[in-house]
Image (spheres, rainbow, N blue to C red):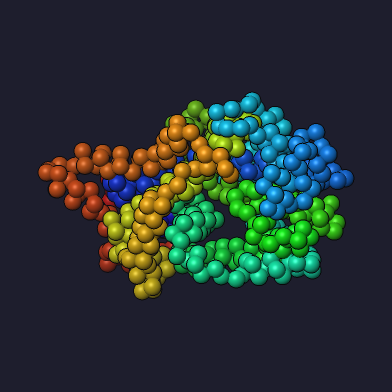
Amino acid sequence: MGPSIDFSLISSWLMLCAKQGPKAGVGLATVVISFVFSTYYNVLMCWALYYLFNSFEASLPWTSCNNTWNAVENCSSGFPGNATHLQSASQQFFDYRLLEKTGSIEEAGGIRWELFGCLIAAWIIVYFCIFKGVKSTGKVVYFTAIFPYFILVALLINNVQLPGAMDGILYFVTPVWSKLFEIKVWVNAAAQVFNSIGIAFGSMVSMASYNKFNNNILRDALIVSLTNSFTSMLAGFVIFSAIGYMAHIHNLPVDNIATDGPGLVFVVYPEVLSTMPVFQLWAPLFFFMLLCLGLDSQFANVEVAITFIKDEFGPEILRFLKREELLVLAVCVICFILGIPHITKGGIYVFQLMDHYTAVVSLMFLAFSEVVAACWLFGVPNISCMVERMLGRPPHIYFLLCWRLLCPVLVLIILMSSIIQYTPAHYGKYTYPEWAEGVGWCISLVSIVWIPLGAIQELYINKGSILQRLRTAVTPTLDLDTDDSLPEKQNLDNAVSETLCKSVV
C-alpha cells in the first residue's frame, strides 16, 4: 500500500479506502498503537544502557551476593534450581538494584533517578538517529541492523565450545509435539512474529512509502520474512547453547534455567556472561547488541507517529514549529514523559501491564481488522491491480489465495483463540488488582476504539436506510482496475498520487 500510493501509513489507508471510516479507522488505530508502543518500549533500551554501563566494572555486579542491595538470607550465587526460597544474584540485581522493585503496582515508590538518566540518554540516541527523517534513519540502520549479526555469530562460536552447550541446543531444537495442541503457544508465536516483523504496527507500510513506485515488494517481503526467521533461529542457538552451559555448571535440567520475558535477557544471560572466559569483552558487546536491536524497532515505530503528523497536519504544525527537527523533538519529549511511570520503583508492574494489553490483546484485534479492511473490503482485485502496476505482472496465485482466505482465516483463529483462552496480566506470581485490569483494558481501547468509531461515523454520514448505508460503507469507491497503461517511471510519484487523491475526493 505504502509504495503503491506513495503516501505513508494513515494516508495510505485513507487513499486505499476512499475515506471510508471502517477502514480508515484501522490506519488511525495503527498509528496510535505504534505511538503507545514507543512510549514504553524505550524502557528496555534504558535497561540495556544501565547493564552496559555496569558491565565495564572489574567484576560484574550481578555475580555476587555481597552487595548492599542483596537479600543475603535468600541469595544464591548460582541458579537456585528447585529451592524456591532462593534467588540468584542476577535476579536480585535485576529486582533490587536495577528496578528497586516495590511489592505491587499500588506502590510507585518514587523515580529511579539512574534509570531516569538512562531513559533520557536512550531518547537522545533515538532523536539524533531520526531527526533528519528517513535519510538519517536509513544510514543508522545500516549499522544497527548488521552489527548484531557479527556479535551473534561470535557468541555462537564461543558458546558451542563450552561444556553442556549441546544439551541446550538439543533442548531448543527437539520438538514437544503436545505443545502444538496448546492454543496459547500459537497465540504467543503470532505475537512474537508480529512484534519482530512489525506486522500491524504500521512501521512496514510507513517505511515502504519511501520506496520507489516500481520497487519489487514481493522480493522485499520474502527477504524480510526469511531474514526474520533466520535471526530468530540464530538467536535461539546462541541463547540455548549458553543456557545448556549454565545447566551443566549448576548440575540442573535445562528447563530449570530457561525462562521467558525480560528475565531471559536481563537475568539468565547476564549470569551466563559472568561465567564465560573474557567476560569483560562479551558482556559489553552483548548489551550493546541489545541496544542496537531495540533501537531498530524504536526508530520504525516513532517514525510512524512523526510521518502521520507530517502528512495530516504538516503545514499547520510547521507554521508553528518552523522546522521538522523540532517536530521530531516534540514527539520524543512527549514519549519520554509518558515513559516516566515505567522507571519508578513500581514501574515494572506498569511496564508489564502496558505490554500485555498493547502487544498482545490490541495487536491481535488490530491485525485482523487490517486484514479484513485490505483483503475483503478494499478487495483482492484492487490489491492485485496495485501490484501489477508496480511490477508489470500480476501477483502469483499463492498470494491471491493468502489474501482471499488464508491470512484472514488464520488471524481470525488466533484472535478467537486468544479471546477464549484469555488470561489476565501478571508479573511472576504477582496478580494485578481489578482496577489495574480496568486500566489495562482502557489501554487496549485507546488504539482499537478508532475502528468502531470510524465505522459509526461512516454509517452516519452515508445516505439511505441502514442496509444501504452499510453497503456503501463496505464498498470501495477507489477503482484501480482500469485499462490505462502503466505510467512512465518519472511520472509515478506525482501522477499516481494525484489521480488517486482526485478519485477519493
- Give x and y (percent) for residue 477: 24, 53
- Give x and y (percent) for residue 199: 47, 55
Query: Looking at the image, can residue 357 be seen?
Result: yes
- Using residue 35 as the reference point, say whether residue 96 is left or right of it: right
* 341 w.r.t. 158: above or below: above
The answer to which image quadrant residue 411 occupies is bottom left
User: Residue pushed farthest top?
Assistant: 110
> At x 72% / y 50%, what residue is drawn?
80
In which quadrant will I find the N terminus? bottom left
Query: Across the whole image, how many numbered discs are drawn on residues?
Result: 0
- Give x and y (percent) for residue 338: 55, 32
- Using residue 413 as the reference point, say whether residue 503 is left or right of it: left
> At x 58% / y 44%, what residue is drawn?
428
In which quadrant will I find the C terminus? top left
Query: Looking at the image, can residue 157 be seen?
Result: no
> At x 29% / y 64%, what residue is drawn?
381
- Using residue 140 as the reference point, say whether residue 490 is left or right of it: left
- Give x and y (percent) for residue 168: 69, 65
Residue nearest the viewer, comparing 365 with 103: 103
* 102 w.r.t. 278: above or below: above
